[in-house]
Amino acid sequence: MSGYFLYHSIGTFPGKEDALRDELARFAAFWSRTDDAQWPTALSLRRDFIDRWRALIDAPTGTLTTAENVTAGLYSVIGSLPERRLRGRRLLVAEDCFPSLHFLLAELAHRCGFTLDTVKLRPGETYVRDDDFVAHWRDDVGVALLTWVTSTASHRCDAGGLIAHGRRMGSIVGVDITQGVGLLPFSVACGADFVVSTSLKWLCGVPGAGVVYVAPSLLADCQPEFRGWFSQDNPFSWDLTKFRLANDARRFDHGTPSILSAVASLPGLRWLAGAGIDTGRAHNRVLTERIIGHARDRGWTIASPPSAEQRGGSVMLGLPQHIDAPSVVAALRSRHLYCDSRGTTLRLSPGVVTAADDVDALCAALDDLLARQ
């Protein structure tokens, strides 16, 4: 038995190792040939990756491209916005956003002239409430960055409702969908101006395969400063006096794109397309409810929202302060039960390779370990 509860970090699916090995072997074969087909083949695979991502979130043609990671994608967008959208205005973000994005925004605030306004957690709470975010969101907010599902509590915001409020405030609204996409349905039809994500987590991809989507209504205003030969309609136009940004999402490209990470993420995207999001979501909900029920029976602290409609695919348990979380994670690992912790929070994310017996084994192990400590 191997109980895997790490879909908030690295997703997997049955047969992943073989599928990934085969995909990389095919790449090695064509990339190593002594002919002139390497780049056409590689770029067609990158296009397949982009098209599968577009289908996943209903993005129109020409609105989505690759990025090394979520932070790079966010930088490309923020660094492309007209000065009037940022200077002298506020950029709104929640305290429970992914820290890397906050680190970036805190630095960009100085150079771009905006005030970074971080909506704080209420004392004793584990996620920022939508109502608190809205209370900070007035018409001086140039950009608001939403975290669709948080990595520390699995809180799922009401993206549609928040985006509608942003429209009334005249703000640009971006959404980080990393912790939910692939398990929960998401469509850019919700009105997001831009979206950033990675292909890890529920998409079962590899590091380096991020994406950035920019809505057509915003794209024309964006003049990315992070640019290069792939930012053009024709990357092979090398006249230094005639550089022109592509008229679609390719303007957010820059130097030679990372092909291998996109190729290595195709098996996960293909598997998801075949299995369907609904199947994985239903399986996950059964298992997460099983964990939550056991935790409630034991009186454990549940750091995630009680309602499944306000939750992603993870359950976060708040361990007592006297419990050493890393030692709990290590003890579970010795029993072939795999999860992780952030501070005193235990993060549990069951997916398609996780069985009900794994959940029962996890709960029994936690009963034993917490009783001992």
Image (cartoon, grey):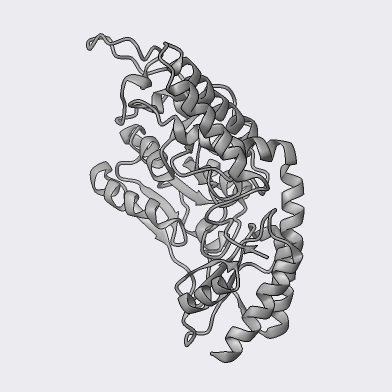
In the image, what residue occupies the spot 62% across and 80% down? Answer: 366
Q: Where residue 331 appears, x then y in whole percent?
A: 53, 77
Could you say which quadrant of the image residue 292 lies in?
A: bottom right
Q: Is residue 154 above or below residue 58?
A: below
Q: Is residue 184 above or below residue 369?
A: above
Residue nearer the viewer, 279 or 17: 17
Hey, which residue is sitting farthest bottom in the picture? 372
Q: Where residue 46 appears, x then y in whole percent?
A: 50, 26
- Residue 59 visible? The answer is yes
In the image, what residue occupies the spot 42% across and 52% down? Answer: 92
Quarter of the image where the N terminus is located: bottom right
Residue nearer the viewer, 264 or 59: 264
In the image, what residue occupies the spot 44% across and 66% down? Answer: 120
In the image, what residue occupies the spot 27% across and 9% down? Answer: 242
Q: Where residue 75 appears, x then y in whole percent?
A: 36, 40
Q: Is residue 325 left or right of residue 336?
A: left
Q: Where residue 281 appears, x then y in whole percent?
A: 72, 52
Residue nearer the viewer, 164 or 214: 214
Could you say which quadrant of the image residue 244 lies in?
A: top left
Label count reads 0
Q: Is residue 102 left or right of residue 172?
A: left
- Residue 181 visible? The answer is no
Could you say which quadrant of the image residue 317 lies in?
A: bottom right
